[in-house]
Amino acid sequence: MKHLPRFFTFAAPSRFYRLAGWTIPWFYATALLFALAGLYMGFFVAPVDATQGNSYRIIFIHVPAAWMSMVLYMAMAGWAAIGWAFNARMAAMMARALAPTGAAFTFLALWTGAFWGKPTWGAWWVWDARLTSELILLFLYLGFMALVEAIDDTRRADNAGALLAIVGAVNVPIIYFSVRWWNTLHQGASISMTAAPKMASTMLTSMLLMTIACWAYAFAVVFLRARALILERERSSDWVQALFGQSQKGVS
């Protein structure tokens, strides 16, 4: 038990603020480098697909975005639950910080999916189980953001958002397993933990590079947003006042 305080050392907003400020530039740089490498591999090195031609290349953006949309929602729901259960300020702020990025990745997944679906299915949109549940995920993100902003009392807003996020988490396994549970147009998983990849090694490499880029980008923007939330909520604390005092001295 004596190591417990060290484990939670960055749960303090002041410590997290400093750690996040140091890591954000590194995450942005990692995202840029891996995105450039992944896009080059995907659009210029990976071979043409025998069935879909060049139109399949949208998967190098679509699939990582879809993965991130689900992972970030579960992270948001998890942090919201911790904030609700333990009255943890930093956890509640992390949940709020995650929501816009998760919504952006969900929109990107739907948008790129439409570009992929037009040449593949002949339609921009179909009420397929996978697509419909992904659209519901976008509404859950938007609903969470609207709910927490609509309530003036911060603590009540965090609790209400946590309830919505936790209930909405049931949609994530529906998205993931929809292609197995129902007869859908959407193709099955190309990468599985229990089976060999169903794509060429260059395609797989590009997919993994883009996934790392999306992870790094998510960390960067979420940490940046969390820092802004910390300054807003902790503006009366001594360390924030001292921080702004140092900034004003540096300008003068």
Image (spheres, grey):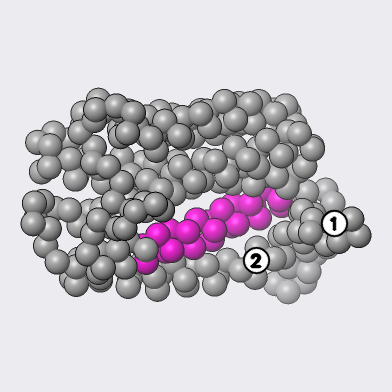
- Name the quarter where the C terminus is drawn: bottom right
Tell whether 237 sits left or right of 252: right
The residue indicated by pointer 1 is 4
Location of residue 110 (image quadrant): top left
Main SS type for the magenta part? helix
Residue at 12% across, 37% down: 121
Q: Where is residue 139 in the image (x, y as percent from the top left)?
A: 43, 29
Location of residue 76 (image quadrant): top right
The front one of 150 and 130 is 130
Three-letter residue code for mark 1: Leu
Say if 227 sits above or below 182 in the image: below
Say if 163 sits above or below 40 in the image: above
The front one of 2 and 105 is 2
Quick check: is 91 in the magenta stretch?
Answer: no
Residue at 79% across, 37% down: 87
The front one of 151 and 245 is 151
Three-letter residue code for mark 2: Gly
Residue at 54% across, 61% down: 220
Tell whether 17 sits left or right of 103: right
Residue 147 shows up from this direction: no
Tell whether 148 sits left or right of 45: right
Mark toward the start of the polypeptide (1 vs 2)? 1
Mark count: 2
Location of residue 1 (image quadrant): bottom right
Residue 21: mark:
2
Q: Which residues lie in the magenta part?
A: 209-231
